[in-house]
Amino acid sequence: MKNASLFLPALLIPIVNLPAQPPKAEITKKLYFTELADDNAIEFDGIPNEAAWEKVTWGGEFIQYQPHENTPPYQPTQFKILYTQKHLVIGYRCFDVSPDSIVQRMSRRDEFPGDWVEINIDSYHDLRTAFSFTLSVSGVKGDEFISDNGNNWDTNWNPIWYAKTNVDSLGWTAEVKIPFSQLRYGNQGDPVWGIQVQRRIFRQEERSTWQYIPRNAGGWVSGFGELHGLCDLPSGKQIELAPYVVAQAERFEKQDGNPFADGSSNRFSAGLDGKLAVTRDLILDFTINPDFGQVEADPGAVRLDGYQIFFSERRPFFMESRNLFDYRLTGSEAGGDYDSDLLFYSRRIGGAPHGYPNVAKGEYADVPQRTSILGAAKFSGKTKKGWSLGILESVTQREMATIDHSGEQRDELVEPLTNYFVGRVMKDYDQGNTIFGGIVTAVNREKGLDWLHRSAYSGGLDFQRFWKNRWWYVRTNALFSRVEGSENAILQTQTGFVHLFQRTNAGHLSVDSTRTSLSGTGGTFRIGKIGGKPDKRGGVFKFESGVTWRSPEFEPNDVGFLLAADEINHFTWAGYQIQKPFSIFRNCRINYNHWARWDFGGQFLNSTFNTNAHAWFKNNWYIGSGMNWNPLDISNNALRGGSSLRRPPGMSTWAYLETDNRKKVSFSLNTSFAWGFGETVRAQDYSGGVNFQPLDALRIGLYPGYSHYWRKQDQYVAQADLDGELRTIVSEVKQRSFSLTARLNYNITPDLTVQYYGQPFIFRALYQNYGYVTDPLNKTYDARFHRYGAQEISFAGDQYFVDENGDGATDYAFGKPDFNFIQFRSNLVVRWEYIPGSEVYLVWSQGSTPDAYADLDTPLLRSLLDNVFEQKPQNIFLVKFTYRFLL
């Protein structure tokens, strides 16, 4: 996605005085030759001055990558590479004429603070994937797995490796030692690896690289230089075991009469994480009884439109090496709300139970908050013949809720025993320019909950082809899904929000209450250009266009993520990007997008046009803005199955500003505004943040957000039956929300950190001017609804009563939908990696969700402050100890 919905008029000026770019010579592939050294020949103190280093020459002659591409860097950089029987060893010399200006900031792992140096290693030499090891001058490590030729950098990969740094009168030096067990490679006797070395000079915001790769190139890994001289690398099948123990104490408000809420609970648990090198290039990762108590809580979020909320994965086991399983149904450069659709969404594993017990008045229930994962395993790697393989399997526990009735207790099933499976395979040809792949997912549940699918399967085939220096590409996939279950389960799927087969105007759909399975298809085709030869201004034109579809019965949500089925979407993005500094800019770009949508009945649903622009200034400020025009919007989901609904056409605009985040104090501001024509919709959103870095080891951030949203009449409220006729009740709605996220990170050492996250959140929705839908597709807005008159509707006891015919008898009723949701979540984590791969966590988690639904008249912020600290919060204190064994 190229930041859709942005437009910056100030950048739409003629660019006429840019210097012409000199003709580029053919890029020469650099080679580096390494030598074998003894394991004990290097003292490993961060200073590469031992005699063993004299076996190899310095690699150097770095070239700027940014801001002034293909020019000499501000300061030179050199490196040497040796290898031993167990390790790849790298020595760095980073020259600097002003050593006292080297920025030694610290942070959490993988945040890449201050000055740093980095090596990328394509040990498969497949020109598509690589392992990245980054070391800041302060000693903070960062590591990433690079895939898709540099389009995907996964920071969740956390190998074991060693590093030391030293600052001297010439700049700074470093030594890095990477165990071969942490890399993946074939069994060639004399392998050639791809490598790239990169340096960042923080105060200049400069990046320089050993192997020159043009910024307009179609890839990253495919442009690496080469490492020669490795011979007879170790092939031992190493085993890593990391057992853990957890002690947890929970304190919460006591509830009189509730035997499950006596104010405290304690637990002790243990588990095991492990890694087995089946071969040098295939790895088995597994976890038994995992615990994720140290993981940061999800932010507050509420949606009134009915769509499910997407939360990103935060659990380490599912985050590491997830690139192979990250199967997006579309993934277009143009973006779109369907871009979050996934065939595998790991948050489905171990989520909240699907069921809730039947609790009568006077009864109390103890319901698990999440489903326990009994175990999980991943098998992944790449063979010497270019096959990338990935298998993930997980089993979640049968979960029971306990209900107490005057001391007598019973159990009810809220989640059946479930098995999840994902299999992925890819094969690349022609040095990674042609790629075939496939994926299969499966979910199987035991019997117990009649309305859940007994089994769910999905899969797909995908193809990618790159040509002309990898500037041009075609990507396509074809997908299927099948769900099976009881008649009730399949009926729930047919009539659920994602599908809504009961829509009265959907002639191509019908509800069949006798079905016990559904089968659907989906897919995407897209063609684009992501690189090219710069013009005389240094600019490159890029584009992508394609189509993506999900048939009405397509249903991957048991282990995937799908917002809506029954859609055919067209998208186009085109952009012009200038990467060369000029005038006051480091670079800038302007983009155009348009989207169109139909359903499988041929109904034209949506048309949207967008333009946006962005600039990075030489003072390291960023700015961008954009505008959308939406002339047509028909929703198949807004009325929850009553019918399609024509929504008002409108426009939206937004902008952002970010100051130089290298400074001690930096700011960001984001604003957006939207409006429907005819005074039908108004939306405002403001968010931003301030970051404060008083010390190199301390960073504090505050990020407030406020939104206000109003719809005139078309907000769904409820459905009712009137003499066999469906009444879809709608209203005017005003919703507001506010959040304030606080973050603190303090490094006592690079391996001992204190991290804090906290967020109070409030969301309030107020409804008024109720009515019902009469002609939902009428082009005149007010003709779509009938608003109740004063004699038709009355209110009593949190219920609205409707008498349409005026005979004095209630025709139907619905509940008052207004609500006020308040939440507070925080985590304080002390993390100590006392030896590489072994950690101790001290965690204090605090949370509260006050019963404030009826607090509707108090001003928004006052309501948040009054309620969030009035109720005694739930406090969880946790100690987790892990120790990693290398066998």
Image (tube, rainbow, N blue to C red):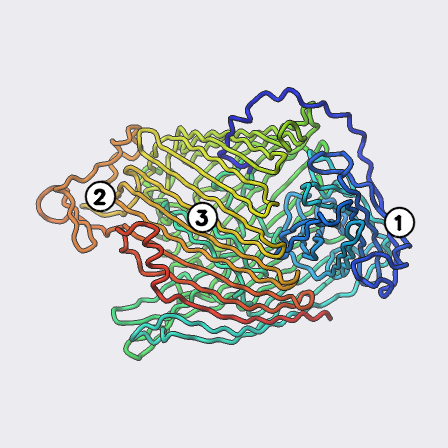
Q: In which quarter of the image is the C terminus?
A: bottom right
Name the residue type under label 1.
Answer: Thr
Q: Name the residue under label 2.
A: 725
User: Do labels 1 and 3 touch, CB within 8 Å?
Assistant: no
What is the number of the mark on residue 57? 1
Residue at 64 percent across and 27 percent down: it is: 583
**Lower position in the chain sequence, tag 1 or tag 2:** 1
How many angstroms separate mark 3 from mark 2 (CA)?
46 Å
Please provide percent x and percent y for residue 219: 69, 39
Q: Classify mark 3: helix, strand or loop.
A: strand
Q: Is mark 2 on a helix, strand or loop?
A: strand
> Please, which residue is most extreme toward the bottom here?
407
In the rendered image, which quarter is residue 770 located in? top left
Q: Distance between the residues labelled 1 and 3?
A: 52 Å
Which is nearer the N-term, disc 1 or disc 3? Answer: 1
Where is residue 343 drawn, in percent x and y?
A: 53, 49
Provide residue 699's location: percent of width, then percent of height.
57, 54
Q: Tell me the kind of residue under disc 3.
A: Pro
On screen, residue 484 versus residue 539, left or right, reads left
Residue 229 shown left or right of residue 455 in the figure:
right
The tag on residue 704 is 3
